[in-house]
Image: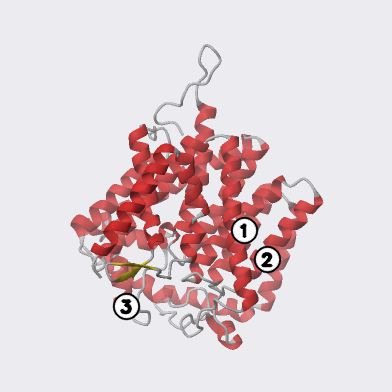
Amino acid sequence: MSIQPLLTPALVTIAGSTLISLLWPEVLLGLALVTRGLVDTLWPYYFLEVGGEKQNLLRLWGAAAPLAGFMVISVRRIPFMRYSVTSPMMAFFALNLLGPAFLSIPSNRFGAFMDLFRIAGPFVFFILAAHSWGSEKGLGRYFKLALASGLSLIAVLTMAGVFGIGFANPNRYSGGEALRELGVGRMVALYHDAWVVVAHLLVATAVLLFFLGRARTQRQKLLLLGLLALVAFLMYHTFLRAGWVAFVAELLAWCLLKRHRALTIFLLLSMLIFVAVQRDFLVNFYADIVGLFRGGSAYWSDTIFQGRGLIWRAQLSYLRDSPMVNVLLGLGLRTNEDIAEATFFVYGRADAHNDFIRILVDNGVIGLLLYLWLMVALFRPAYQLMRRGSQEVSLAAISLLVMGVGYLIMSLTGRPTLFPPFTWFLWGLAGVLHGIAAKERAPASPMGIKEPAKAGDG
């Protein structure tokens, strides 16, 4: 497909986004959060004909919004070196830029180019959120917008369930024995993939838990618990078992961080009941792990490792047999897809199905170490603010850590690093908290007014 028909709508989208963000940077942040769900809803649908080809103008928003944000940072000279994530992010981005340019020529060049936007975009929103919303007032704005996005998602999924639409063909997603026996597909509603639905639901879970923590009346608590129960129901019908694990892990992390002993015991008992009911599943799960280390393929398994073992071994074996420069610096963006397609031919398109292995193959050992450094730098202020911040800030910090638990679990079987539903919301909230932490560390002037934090703080 020629990229020429996209130029006019692309320029219009980028110009409009840049103009809005230059005049009102907070409007760009708000639009990015609220419209994220809408963009993902309409992602598979084409409604605009340009140059004889049908295109979805909303597809351009994913690239236009980060680019507009970058221009705002440059024009307004917004400081960003003060934050601890800046150094690992810039090094990680530079390594990604180096990969497709010098180390390999991936078959999906356009996809590799767009991945650069997906990597840089969250950092752009992080800087804008830290600069514009780095206060308790800004924290409130973030959660109101995130709640609006989450409620719109829940409404779309609920209506799809009521009218019986938006279930993927079970032949497209094997989904295990449970899905085949029921004869239904995964809940995708108007979204193009159940994975996108799960990502949004996990973000909504962390947001709802934040509001549950600050709820004052019994009516508010019951309403929020009802919404969480609805999220659990919708999550179940995605039949994405990594999502089930991540959802339960988020609830358990919340209970542990909030020190809710009764709820923690309840969740642990529920997990024991699940173990008792799903004995066969767990036996197969254990067999998959043993087979993975002994060289078995885990090819048609009905557990969480469905088909993954073969892909993971192929990825790691290919990297192991590569020259040392590739082991250290990677094979280039999207190279993992070429390896996966050559190995796991059942899918028309495949990837590493593990963010850590994907980064190791595409960016090498150095890239993986940079990514781990980035994750530590991203979540460390949240852990600190959880212990010493105000009640509102402490709840927000716990919410970010809970969101991070879901993010990291999904990284074991997917690639949330490249999915905007996770990265935009997670990095946006992290930016707000980093902004608050930077202001708290700013030294006081002789007049008693805190000065901006110096470069390197945060």
Query: Label 3 crowding class (10 Å Cα cut-off): few <14, some 14-19, many 20+?
Result: some
Name the residue tied to disc 1.
Answer: 151
Total number of numbered discs in the rendering: 3
Whether residue 388 appears in this view of the structure is yes
Name the residue tied to disc 3.
Answer: 343
Left/right of residue 283 with respect to residue 273 in the rendered view: left
Farthest-out residue, right = 218
Identify the residue at image location x=28%, y=65%: 335
* Amino acid residing under circle 2: Leu
Disc 3 secondary structure class:
helix
The image quadrant of residue 125 is: top left
Residue 343, relative to residue 23: is it above or below?
Answer: below
Query: Label 1 crowding class (10 Å Cα cut-off): few <14, some 14-19, many 20+?
Result: some
Whether residue 369 appears in this view of the structure is no
State which tag comes first along the sequence, 1 or 2. 1
Identify the residue at image location x=36%, y=58%: 60
Residue 228, relative to residue 428: is it above or below?
Answer: below
Identify the residue at image location x=36%, y=62%: 358
Residue 142, horizontal then vertical, whole percent: 56, 45
